[in-house]
Image (cartoon, rainbow, N blue to C red):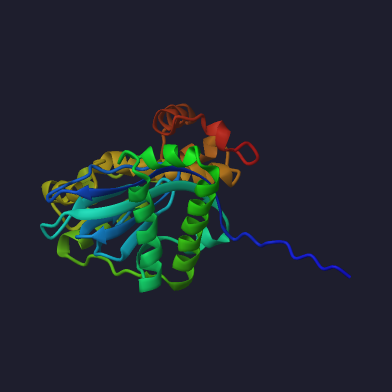
Amino acid sequence: MILFYPVARPLITSGFYSFFSYLYPEEYYFEGEHHPFWEVSFCLDGAAGVSADDKVYRLNPGDMIVHRPHVYHKLWAEKKTFAHVLTISFDAEGEVLDQLDGAYSCGFALQEQWRLLNRMIGESGCPKKLTGYLRYLEKRPREFQRVTNLFESCLLTLADEGLPLGFNHSENALHYERIIRTLKNNIGGNLSIHELGRECGLSASSMKKIFSHYNSMGIHKYYLHLKMEEAVRLLTKGHTVTEVADLLGFANQSYFSTVFKREMKENPARFKPGRR
């Protein structure tokens, strides 16, 4: 009797959007972004500050962060150092992804795997651009698979062995966390800046200054971003467009649909179950 054992695939990477390492100069300050795919950033050297959703972290060599799709994030060089960071953005699926969120400290063996990926970029001699290495790999499918296998091995090991990294507990970082938590708790309302400041115990000017340090989107814009994320979640669960508009505090379905199309570049009907 011949037994056959199918290979379990708790993680499958379907493709990459960027794959690069960069030495960010002292005082570097990235304005921030959010996108519909996954991203990891591994600190090779120096120190980098990162905000992700309502949390703020400091990455030292051997630390890394995992950004889920649509999470707004920002990066800057810290401690007057040049921050050398390996960044990989990708699409993937599998149960392992359910375990990955936030920042981690990597053990020595896992650090060596991430550093090997960085060396492979350097050894390729490709241009140091967001997609330069991917264009190089595209012409070398066997090498591309080896790199993908190593990348998946890194994520699998991270899920098993990565140690969650503590948050930045500075006063301003805690204020920032409180601001976003308050916005989330009032996702169905329409908080004004002054109402938000009153909830958080901050003046409007102090609150705007703190928020802008960690998030370049602006408070009102970020509040809208949170509403759109929640709208996608509700729509995919089966709520109608009218129900979602009402739950998120929009005056009517028409206005909600207009805002959704503008912010998400999609018609809300596309997010109905079975249509994604």
Quadrant where the N terminus sits is bottom right
* Residue 242 pos. (x, y %): 53, 35
Q: Nearer the viewer, residue 266 or 22?
A: 22
- Left/right placement of residue 137 relative to residue 63 reads right
- Residue farthest toward the right in the current orientation of the protein: 1
Kindly tell me whether residue 131 is visible in this rendering.
Answer: no
- Looking at the image, which is closer to me, 96 or 170? 96
Residue at 24% from the left image edge and 64% from the top image edge: 60
Count the labels in the image: 0
Residue 255 appears in the rendering = yes
Q: Position of residue 43 (x, y in %)?
A: 28, 59
Q: Nearer the viewer, residue 177 or 48?
A: 48
Taking the spot 26% from the left edge, 41% from the top edge, the residue there is 217
Considering the image in quadrants, where does the C terminus appear? Answer: top right
Q: Position of residue 5 (x, y in %)?
A: 75, 65
Q: Is residue 142 left or right of residue 259?
A: right
Q: Residue at x 24, y 54 (%)?
A: 84
What's the residue at 36%, 69% (across, down)? Answer: 106
Q: Considering depth in this image, is 109 or 256 the residue closer to the camera? A: 109
Give the answer, above or below, for where 184 lies relative to 126. Answer: below
Residue 49, position in %: x, y? 22, 57
Q: Is residue 252 above or below residue 211?
A: above
